[in-house]
Amino acid sequence: MKLDILAFGAHPDDVELGCSGTLAKEISLGKKVGIVDLTRGELGTRGSAEIRDTEAAKAAAILGVAVRENLRFRDGFFANDEKHQMEIIKMIRKYQPEIVLCNAVTDRHIDHGKGSKLVSDACFLSGLSKIETELDGQVQTHWRPKVVYHYIQWQNIEPDFVVDISGFMDKKMESVLAYGTQFYDPSSDEPVTPITSKNFLDSIQYRAQDLGRLVGVDFAEGFTTERYLAVSSLENLL
């Protein structure tokens, strides 16, 4: 299955928090979108890997993505090395996306920066024909996405561009809240973490609102890019 957009996250819920409004919008426009999670989030303070599997499947159904896979790398301990790069290369060649979205280049959680560089490096390597891979007994063809964009996570990184997600904020929040064990729940007796506060949950909305305010729309998501952005006409800009 060829995809238009493939979004990677170091953990289940990274994609939902970072770029699910954009994915929902692109899906509504007829684009084929997939998600690949690098780990099962098994080191998360709340819940379990099995619960996160269920939550991730629920979030994927809410967004309407065509496919979601989990590479089952070790949460907290995966590395940007040949072994892990090859597994991501297989995913890129399997789905041949034009656009790849991945973790923030730097962030509070060490897996986010690691995941960002790992996926970016694999996108480049995937285009080299002398790197040979097989999947399900079939030799794969080399493929390099046209662009790699990084969504913004915990840290308020200055975006290189924003996507208007007005009309899709409710869908974003619904997909985030599919992870019932991970976010604000006043009835929970599990340990408190930085992402379980009401302030964090509220920040998802007010960050998108503020980015939207700055460009004259209701809500937006921010991204950084590895190369210059280009438009065919000034009229393409909002």
Image: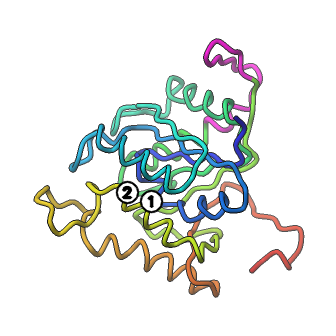
Q: Assess whether mark 2 and mark 1 are in contact (beta carbons under 8 angstroms).
A: yes
Q: Measured from the top left, where is residue 166 in percent x and y?
A: 60, 77
Name which residue type carries label 2. Ala
Q: Residue at x 69, y 30 (%)?
A: 93
Residue at image coords 64%, 12%: 137
Q: Amino acid at mark 1?
A: Ser
Q: Nearer the viewer, residue 196 or 154?
A: 196
Q: Who's the residue at 22% across and 66% down the image?
A: 185
Q: Nearer the viewer, residue 149 or 72?
A: 72
Apparent side of residue 12 relative to residue 158 in the rendered image (left or right): left
- Counting from the top left corner in percent of width and height, residue 144 is at 74, 37
Q: Position of residue 79 (x, y in %)?
A: 43, 33
Residue matched to label 2 = 178
Secondary structure at badge 1 equals helix
Q: Is residue 164 above or below residue 122?
A: below
Q: Secondary structure at mark 2?
A: loop
- Location of the C terminus by quadrant is bottom right
The segment highlighted magenta reads: 122-140
Q: Is residue 175 above or below residue 117?
A: below
**Relative to residue 237, is residue 127 depicted above or below?**
above
Mark sitting on residue 65:
none
Q: Is residue 168 above or below residue 151?
A: below
Q: Count residues near mark 2 (Cα–Cα under 10 Å), then give few for <14, some for 14-19, many for 20+.
A: many
Kindly indicate the quadrant of the structure image that contains residue 222: bottom right
Magenta span contains residue 47: no
Residue corresponding to mark 1: 175
Is the N terminus in the top left, top right, bottom left or bottom right quadrant? top right
